[in-house]
Image: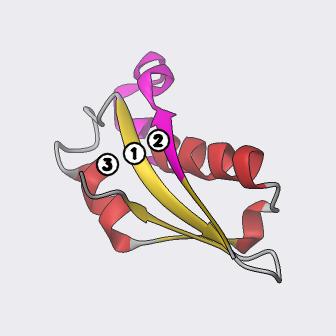
């Protein structure tokens, strides 16, 4: 099992329309995890804490970045959750 702390920048989602920003932030989180942990997107599972953090300020104003603790198992499955500071 491999574990990493990753800081995911979400500032690029502010350039999309206001009603799609939170959804775009979730998708960008999955893409970044795929890139950093060499896994396919269908094997990435996000914890509910990530969803709550992104939607905390509503659909139009997601955070600029989030810190994620991701674990990659031997079968390629990736589980991610918000990193506690």
Residue 13 % position (x, y): 47, 27
Residue 11 % position (x, y): 43, 22
Q: Which of marks 2 and 3 is nearer the N terminus?
A: 2
Is 80 included in the stretch rendered in magenta? Answer: no
Q: Earlier in the sequence, mark 2 or mark 1?
A: 2
Residue 71 % position (x, y): 60, 69
Q: Distance between the residues labelled 1 and 3?
A: 11 Å
Query: In this image, 58 relative to 41: left or right?
Result: left
Discs 2, 3 touching: Cβ within 8 Å? yes
Q: Relative to residue 44, is residue 54 depicted above or below?
A: above
Q: What residue occupies the far bottom of the structure in this picture?
A: 75
Q: Nearer the viewer, residue 78 or 52?
A: 78
Q: What stretch is highlighted in magenta?
A: 5-23
Q: Which residue lies under the disc numbered 2?
A: 25
Q: Which residue lies under the disc numbered 1?
A: 67
Residue sitting at 47 percent across and 38 percent down?
7
Q: Earlier in the sequence, mark 1 or mark 3?
A: 3
Q: Which residue lies under the disc numbered 3?
A: 54
Q: Relative to residue 45, is residue 30 depicted above or below?
A: above
Q: Residue 41 carries which label?
A: none
Residue 28 % position (x, y): 58, 41
């Amino acid at each position: 099992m491999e574990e990493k702390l990753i800081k995911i920048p979400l500032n690029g989602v502010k350039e999309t329309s206001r009603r799609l920003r939170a959804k775009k932030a979730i998708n960008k989180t999955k893409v970044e995890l795929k890139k950093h942990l060499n896994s396919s997107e269908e094997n990435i599972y996000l914890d509910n804490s990530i969803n709550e953090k992104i939607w905390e300020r509503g659909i139009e104003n997601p955070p600029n970045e989030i810190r994620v603790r991701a674990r990659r198992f031997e079968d390629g499955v990736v589980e991610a959750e918000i990193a506690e500071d």
